[in-house]
Amino acid sequence: MTKVAFRLTAAAALLAAGPAPLNAQSSVPEAVLPATVTVDFGKSRGAFLHPERYNNLSRERTFPGQRDADVQFFNEQGLHGHTYKVWVDAHLIFDAARGTYNYDLVADYLSDVSRLSDNLLMVMDTRVMIRDGKARPAEVKPVILNIMRELKRRHPQIKYIEAFNEPDHNLAKVLTPSGLYDFYKVYYEAVNQVNRELKPKVPLLLGGPGFMQYSNEWLNPFLDRYKADPSPGKRLDFISWHGYGRFPEGTGATNGPRAYHFYKTDPSEVASERGRLEAALKARGLNTRIPGFITETGIYPGPSFDNSGDARPDYLIGAAGVPSLQYWYMENPGIVPFNWVLRHFSEERKDQLITRGGADRKTTLTNTFTPYGNAMAMMAKLKDVRVPAQSSALTKGKGVYAIATKDKSGLAVMVWNYQHVGTRSYQVTIDMAALPAKLAGKPLRQRMYRIDDKVSNYWANPATANLQQVGEIVVKAGRTHSSTVTLTPNALHLVVLEPEGRRK
């Protein structure tokens, strides 16, 4: 067995130089505790989902002048998408007074994102028509039919249609949970017609309802209506909701305090959602293998925060917190969590790129990751087959997480210490067993990458904001190998082992 103890090199320390972000905690940090991550490269957990490849862009009017550079940068950083979610608002394309359609607003937007992702998931948002315009299903159908048909013709990478966005909030004042299905029905009728007419190589798939949370109050009546629908053309290709927490059910009220329960306090709570969905489907005799798309996943819904006066500590909390949510979602086959969001129009804690930087905290930067964006770039370096990895220090969603992967190019293990606002640090020994025979006993180049309050963190040093490599050595591992890393609160670390001659 080889054993390599990781320490920040002098060069890495220089990279980390600069003013550290304000500490989110005022208490004295706790003692560093020991932890072990045990990896078995001899077994497989199947294909690794690569959640960094499922992502969101805000609407077309969000930083349009910056979008070309952002698309190029994400593609260069290994973040070309499998599926990106995009937004199309029916009322901005269809002029009800004139009965005309104008697609100029979304033309460049959808073309840009088509260069960024293999597939697009399009939110076909009709909330303004339904809620404000009081449109009936029969009035909605021709509008969405025309829009989807034309956009699918122009942008064939549109594969998924998400019928609504948070209708349990946005439409709660005008629709009952059961009544939502009357509008969903015209969506599947329109999607079926588009597929018949265009006969696209990749047909449109339809799902939703894009609830703001996993909600039995809204989902069960919707599924009851779907079950009772006698149409042979009905379809529910995926079921979608958002992964932030649990909120007051369905009144649509926005005034007064709201009793939010955030998943950031215990990300493992989301692990039960797939089982609840399958139970609901099974009880109705429906296909229990319908995919679940978590089309927004995040630590900070709406304008929420942990540090109200200074967002900088929250950037790092999000960087460790979102992968923690994704970890638990990925423990359930059939769940696909989407990141939220490349740039947000108003809330900086959600940003994957620095949108509110500089001394004035208002400067949009090019090619500059937030810590959250760096976490996605770190995940992009993971390999394509997941293997078992067990942490000794993970309780109620907090502590040391681990994802271990392999493929023909080598091995990679990502560990992180999600503490939310806690102060606990760990010295983590990563014990790697059953290294593949083609790697065991041969020189391997071990590269280390890190994100914490000083490294790969714009708020510590803008010059070294993007993901930093903090160590590189050549090791000769046997069938086992071990590395030791220290994880401060909300720090993330990646170990990559590849044959010595392989390029980065």
Image (tube, rainbow, N blue to C red):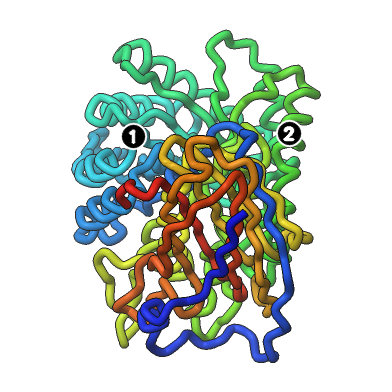
In this image, 342 relative to 375: left or right? left
Q: Which picture quadrant has residue 143?
A: top left
Residue that appears at 36% across and 20% down: 202
For the N terminus, give its image quadrant: bottom right
Which label number is shown at residue 118? 1
The location of residue 278, given as percent across then percent down, is 73, 30
Q: Who's the residue at 22% across and 40% down the image?
A: 111
Question: In the image, what residue occupies the spot 23% across and 45% down?
Answer: 112
* Residue 435 x, y percent position in the rendering: 57, 42
- In the picture of the structure, the residue carrying the numbered disc 2 is 220
Amino acid identity at mark 1: Asp
Residue 65's place in the image compared with 110, above or below, is below
Q: Look at label 2 and name its amino acid.
A: Asn
Is any atom of residue 106 visible in this view? yes
Q: Nearer the viewer, residue 122 or 428?
A: 428
Few, some or many residues within 10 Å of mark 1 (<14, 14–19, 20+): some
Q: Secondary structure at mark 1?
A: strand
Identify whether 264 is placed above or below 60.
Answer: below
Residue 346 seen in render: no
SS label for mark 2: helix
- Of 88 and 6, nearer the camera is 6
Q: Provide residue 489's location: percent of width, then percent of height.
A: 62, 74
Q: Residue at position x 30%, y 49% from top?
A: 503
Q: Nearer the viewer, residue 204 or 481?
A: 481
Q: CA distance from mark 1 to mark 2?
A: 33 Å
Q: Is residue 504 left or right of residue 305?
A: left
